[in-house]
């Protein structure tokens, strides 16, 4: 059993729906899941070292930017050892803008640069998740679960 953090920022509730779907799937795989909301919970990047796997849900603000409530966390990542830890990044965006889902890409690239082990899919949903998007959330969660065992072996050495 792995310790999993599902951490998200959601302005309209769309990314929150994605986070809930992902957390539900992971719980059904008998992993311990903690959910935190950037808006409600005081989140410090150092906290992620308590978890084997972290799934980050981030909506995209305006034209491809990180939301304000995620900016401090993003900067704090420079001071956290992410090597061997599994991460996945997902979020909602609006295809109306020139840069669709840019916050997902920004966070994914930052985690990659810092040595995190990433689920290869960057999951982006246009506005509210439909049934096909819900299935894509479950698939992302499934891939993360498959990687949890690898992460645990890394940290158990």
Image (cartoon, rainbow, N blue to C red):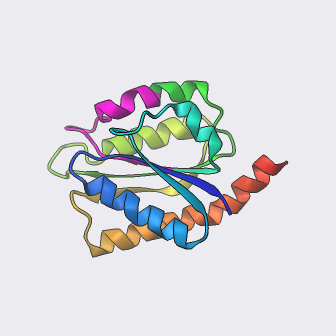
Magenta residues span 55-74
User: Which residue is located at x 53 percent, y 30 percent?
Assistant: 77
Using the image as rendered, state which of residue 10 and residue 97 is in the foreground.
10
Residue 88 image point, x, y percent: 50, 52
Say which quadrant the N terminus sits in. bottom right
Give the left or right position of residue 8, taking residue 67 as reference. right
Please identify the residue farthest to the left as the structure is shown: 96
Give the left or right position of residue 84, taking residue 98 as reference. right
Give the left or right position of residue 63, taking residue 143 as reference. left
Give above or below for 157 relative to 42. below
Residue 27 image point, x, y percent: 53, 67
Please identify the residue farthest to the right as the structure is shown: 157
Residue 79 image point, x, y percent: 59, 24
Give the left or right position of residue 137, taking residue 46 as reference. left
User: Which residue is located at x 53 percent, y 39 percent?
Assistant: 111
Residue 150 image point, x, y percent: 72, 58
């Amino acid at each position: 059993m792995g310790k999993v953090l599902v951490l998200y920022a959601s302005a309209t509730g769309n990314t929150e729906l994605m986070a809930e779907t992902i957390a539900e799937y992971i719980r059904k795989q008998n992993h311990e899941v903690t959910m935190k909301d950037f808006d409600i919970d005081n989140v410090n990047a150092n906290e992620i070292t308590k978890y084997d796997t972290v799934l980050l849900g981030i909506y995209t603000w305006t034209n491809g930017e990180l939301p304000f409530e995620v900016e401090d966390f993003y900067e704090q990542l420079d001071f956290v050892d992410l090597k061997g830890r599994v991460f996945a990044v997902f979020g909602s965006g609006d295809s109306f803008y020139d840069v669709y889902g840019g916050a997902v890409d920004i966070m994914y690239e930052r985690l990659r640069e810092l040595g995190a082990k990433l689920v290869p899919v960057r999951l982006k949903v246009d506005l509210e998740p439909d049934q096909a998007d819900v299935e894509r959330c479950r698939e992302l969660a499934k891939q993360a679960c498959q990687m949890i065992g690898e992460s645990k072996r890394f940290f158990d050495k």
